Structures are given as C-alpha cells and as structure tokens.
Image (cartoon, helix red, strand yellow):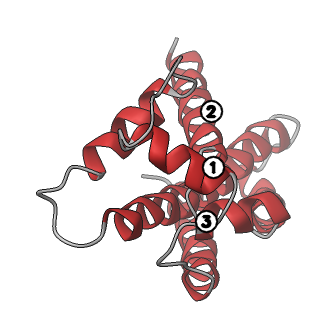
Amino acid sequence: MNAFGRLSRLVAAGLAVFAAAVYASRFAAVLHPGDSAHLFVRYAGVAPLGAPEHPLWGALLAALSVHWWPGSSVVRANAFAWVVGVASVYAFARLVSACAFDVLRRPLADESRAVVPALAAGLVAGFAYAFSASALQAGAQLEFRSFHVLFACVALALARRVSANG
C-alpha cells in the first residue's frame, strides 16, 4: 500500500469519526414524522409496500426490522441510517481524494507533490457533504439518500480500480 493510500484512509476515517460523533449527537430513538416514519412502516411490513422504490436499501432495512433482533426496531432502523451515513462520508472523501490524486499527479514529475492537494480536496469535499443539511438529516434518522451516495461511491471506486488495472 502506498503512502497516499494510507494517508487518504486516515484522513477519510478521521472525518468519518467526526461525522459519526455529530450524527450520534442528533440520533433519534423515535421515528420522525414524515418520510422517515412513512419509509419505516412500509419497509417493516406494517403498511403495504406497493412498488418497491429502493430494493437493496429496503431489503437491508427489512432484515434489520425482523423481530428476533434485540432492541427496538425503530432504534435499529435509525442506527442503520447512522452507519450508512458515516460510511458514505468515508467513501465520498476517499473517492474525491483518489480522483484528485489521479488528476494532479499526471502533469507532475514528482507524484509526492500531488498528495497534500489531493488529501485537502477529499477533506473539503467530504466535510461539505458530511455537514450538508441532507446528510445531517440522513445520518440521524431513517433515510435512503445516504445509501444512494454510498452505493454510487462504491460503484465509482470499483470502476476506477478496474480502469486503472485494465
């Protein structure tokens, strides 16, 4: 593993830990009225689902709302949103810093000169995402949008890896 990879993981992990603490301070043990409650009752099987809008996210949520898991299903659902929100912050910061490093290192004779600006790009972009209004909401209550960000970041990171090896 190269030095940039280690530093990028460290910066993204530090940002994710900070976001986790902020999201935890806003964590709710109850359902918020509106979308959060509507999503929960539909995907927990309390109300009819209709056409599934978010199949992968919904399947994971349904697995967490099974009654034999310990604790309140509402707390588990909100904890799932918290974990996904924190993971999406990490993935977004890592993806931005890696893409910035790829772009910045090409014109430079010395790759090491691209490390700090690429890490700064990942940190600033990750911070802007982590503390945007929608990410703050999605990290503290049941919401699917941060799962979409996480899924997109993972897909783009895999595509980047395949194109680098191809």
Badge 1 is on which residue?
146
x and y percent of residue 58 in the render? 43, 35
Q: Earlier in the sequence, mark 1 or mark 3?
A: 3
Which is closer to the viewer, label 3 or label 2? 3
Q: Is residue 126 left or right of residue 150?
A: right
Badge 2 is on which residue?
152
The CA distance from mark 3 to mark 2 is: 17 Å
Q: Is residue 86 left or right of residue 99?
A: left
**The label number, if any, that marks residue 126 in the structure image:** none
x and y percent of residue 84 in the render? 50, 55
Estimate how packed mark 2 is, as few (under 14), some (14 to 19) or many (20 or more) residues with alpha carbons within 10 Å.
some
The CA distance from mark 1 to mark 3 is: 8 Å
Task: Indicate the amino acid at tag 1.
Answer: Ser
What SS does tag 1 mark?
A: helix
Task: Indicate the amino acid at tag 2.
Answer: Ala
Q: Please determine whether, in this image, residue 108 is positioned above or below residue 157.
A: below
What SS does tag 2 mark?
A: helix
Task: Indicate the amino acid at tag 3.
Answer: Gly
Q: Is residue 86 left or right of residue 120?
A: left
